[in-house]
Amino acid sequence: MEEEQFTKLQSAKILVTGGAGFIGSNLCERLLELEAKVTCLDNFSTGHKHNLNALIKNPNFTLIEGDIRDASTCQKACESMDFVLHEAALGSVPRSLRDPVTSNEVNVTGFLNMLVAARDADVKRFVYAASSSTYGDSENLPKVEDKIGKPLSPYAITKYVNELYADIFQDAYGLDTIGLRYFNVFGRKQDPNGAYAAVIPKFVMQFMEHESPVINGDGTYSRDFTYIDNVVQMNLLALTVEDKKAVNEVYNTAVGDRTNLVELTQYLKEFLSNYDPEIINVEVKHGPNRPGDIPHSLASVEKAKDLLGYNPQYDIRSGLKEAVEWYWNNLR
């Protein structure tokens, strides 16, 4: 049923901002498989050209190197587009704490530039990357879309502002939007390097090099780790859903299960030891808790199931198996 629904995207003109990034490049790849006409807008501040190597020669793929902080670039990129998948952002709570100004410029000003450009180009639907950080200090578990707390970082504030702006643009200008609150996405093409690398690829690389990864805190903090293919599925559903009740909403994009960091490292050691038995003996160390981190994150995905027809195909273990295989084959 899903595949039949997604065939609507054949020949559709779709702009993916941040298309050279981890999530964006996976979206570009899947959209090209569906024979959409895909334009990627990226300034390569966190994305990588090598993520596009397999796409660049596809006649249905166009690359625009540019920055969403420049309004004219956004206007040019949106011209004649049917849909926008807005993935461009500066992620990372620690990065936003160190440099809140740049996070705000990219995540708020850049987001607003894109909304204006999409409105002016009469785009049919604007689907954007929201964030589970919006739940802030809310202690409710599982997280339900209409109950949020106080943001705990500049990054969280920027992502909540995105939701407020999207809501206003629907009310004031009739631009259809859908926000997807991503919960700890992982999988192929996720960058293991740099100061703000996500925990899973970073730990995988350290284990492969027989280095001890450092868990922040005692390892009991838990997350709803979400494999990339579940996220791609959610984006395609958001683009193609026809029920008007499903549009102009935000949705948790997750699995609906949580794993703590001790369990996560055990799974990684288990799967990696299939390739290198020595990894099972690598010690895991512990450091201080990270400022701005919430202790636990677990999503309810009932709204996405009810309104979008979401059915996540990967749990933490099946997703990690796929991810570990990709890292082993591509990053050693």
Image (cartoon, rainbow, N blue to C red):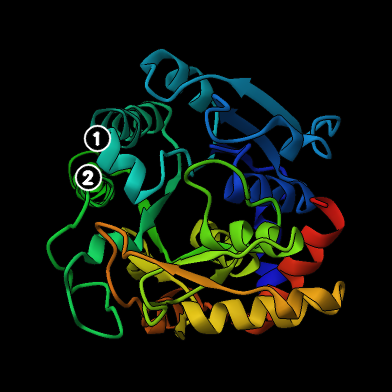
Residue 154 numbered tag: 2
| Residue appearing at x 37%, y 68% in the figure | 251
Which residue is outermost to the top? 72
Q: Is residue 241 visible?
A: no
| Helix, strand or loop under label 1 | helix
Say which amino acid is labelled 2. Pro
The residue furthest left is 150
**Residue 155 position in % (x across, y down):** 28, 46
Left or right of 67? Residue 165 is left
- From the image, tell me which residue sits under label 1: 100
Decide: is 31 above or below 16: below
Q: Residue at x 20, y 64 (%)?
A: 136
Residue under the image location 55 percent in, 41 percent down: 194
Left or right for 251, reference 77: left
Packing grade of label 1 (10 A; few <14, some 14-19, many >=20) is some
293 versus 158 height, above or below: below
**Residue type at tag 1:** Pro
The answer to the question of whether label 2 and label 1 lie on touching residues, with beta carbons closer than 8 A, is: yes
